[in-house]
Amino acid sequence: MMTGFPTLLYKEVLRFWKVALQTVAAPVLTSLLYVLIFANLLDRRLEVYPGVPYAMFLIPGLAMMSALQNAFANSSSSLIQSKMTGNVVFVLLAPLSHLEFLGAYVLAAILRGIVVGAGVLLVAVPFWAPTVREPVWLVAFCVVGTGTFGAFGLIAALVVDKIDQMAAFQNFVIMPLTFLSGVFFSIHSLSEFWQKASHLNPVFYMIDGFRYGFFGVSDVAPQISISIALACFATIFSIAYVLVARGHKLRA
Amino acid sequence: MTAAIELAGVNKQFGTLQALADIDLTIQQGEFFGLLGPNGAGKTTLISILAGLARADSGVAKILGHNVRTQYRLARRLLGVVPQELVFDPFFTVREALRIQSGYFGLRQNDDWIEEVMYNLDLTPKADSNMRALSGGMKRRVLVAQALVHKPPVIVLDEPTAGVDVALRRGLWAFIKRLNADGHTVVLTTHYLEEAETLCGRIAMLKAGRVIALDSAANLVRTLHSLQLKVRIEGVLPAQLRIEGVASLGDCHVIPLRDYDELEPTLSVLRTCGCRIVELDLQQPDLEDVFIHLMNRDH
């Protein structure tokens, strides 16, 4: 049967690409500022892993954090805006299956996450010489992580009714989860309590695993991290699927 | 022949409000069907159920034999809906919006038809304009075009001419009539009753979620059994004619008659009483009179 999935995916990609200054360039610039400040300040004072200077440690984590945040922002802002303006009706009237609907939004979120993440790595080149030791792990963590946050963004957009509720979601859930995930530090530098607390944060495993892709060194074994990331993705994606299938706050 | 639209025992409640109550309605293929009712009567809810934008609490809705719940993909493919709200996607031009809408239905090589739809709705000069830059009337045209991009056999227009100028109305109805003549079923809701009277073969009137009348416009008008005799006379209106429903303004009087048989006796009274008729006009009821009569009646 002819499917609308490629078109919905194309439209979702086009949507963020048309405003790339805001959706890609801005988060890349923000990350660059982090690199400029923290890497310059701490590069010679800190060595998180043996032989890995601070800038080298920071940049992959920062790239992954930006990728995750932007994956969330893509699906959540697209759907909430469509709900608010009412133009979501064009998608709802179409003969798309629930999986096609969900898949297109999540895949577009993954793409934006990857574009932003790659942009961060690219602009940070003057500060480090990237070497990828484990490319398969790197790609796997990037796709699973951004996919999870893309699906999470969709859940948020389905659940909330207003833009300010979405902002609260972003500020009180997404920001703490991503900032307290070992982007700026190795959890081994934390006290035992906060080390244990970090292990409860699924984003920690995504960032730690992504970093493993570059250095072949991580706080947790990548097999454990990918298992946790995949379980997280499966759970979030399933919840999003159920909400889409029910038409939660989409269909009366 | 399979019905274009079939609703059987459809109920829908929003909180304590019974939006639709036991709706049974069949619309045959090729019909131009009118769905009339005051605001809140349930027209848009009914359309939303057909389009899958709302779910019936009970009952069955089918588009060309396909259940809108269990076979929603097939049903939606056969249906084109012009929503009542003036919505648009601000990221795209008119042509992009139409190509995207066509793509949602799996039609990615559909430019010939898209161009034809734009031409017929006078959208071609605005094809590369961003949706944000269009006037309200133009946006309404795009909504109509979006509903037609996949050539649906069943077209539902929810107040498509609200806030639209006369030129577009004429152009739109000419195009829709052509599609209807080509075999497309058209369901129309409108507050312009003369549009419904002119265009629709059959009309259903909804009130408080129920179908209270269903027939052709002509038959609905006939059910009213009412004529209005407007007379301007010299002299005082005779007491025999000062019946309930008579409206007088100066020497002008509007006298309701049940049918043509009452005309001659009424004129005879005026003659007998020596009232000279200066001006006379006999008005037949139209769909608006029927609508007002039915909506004011207790059901």
Image: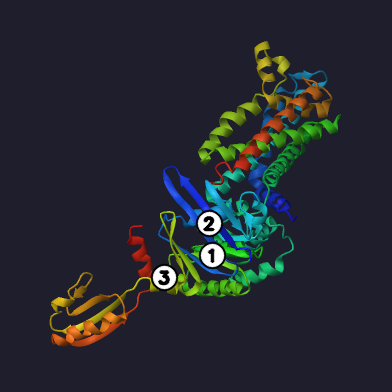
Q: Can residue B7 be seen in this view?
A: yes
What SS does tag 2 mark? helix
| Disc 2 chain ID | B
Label 3 sits on residue:
B220
Residue B29 vertical position relative to residue A101 in the rendered view, above or below? below
Kind of residue indicated by mark 3: Leu
| Disc 1 chain ID | B
Label 1 sits on residue:
B187
| Disc 3 chain ID | B
Of labels 3 and 1, earlier in sequence is 1
Label 2 sits on residue:
B47
Taking the spot 55% from the left edge, 36% from the top edge, the residue there is: A167
Is B97 left or right of A138, judged from the image as shown? left
Q: Nearer the viewer, residue B21 or A136?
A: B21
Of labels 1 and 2, earlier in sequence is 2
Mark whose residue sits in front, 3 or 1: 3
Residue B217 vertical position relative to residue A129 in the rendered view, above or below? below
Q: Residues within 10 Å of mark 1 (few under 14, many from 20)?
A: many
Is B214 left or right of B186, judged from the image as shown? left
Kind of residue indicated by mark 2: Ile
Is A97 left or right of B196, judged from the image as shown? right
Position in image of residue B86 (x %, y %): 51, 58
Q: Nearer the viewer, residue B78 or A68?
A: B78
Q: Nearer the viewer, residue B173 or B143?
A: B173
What SS does tag 1 mark? strand
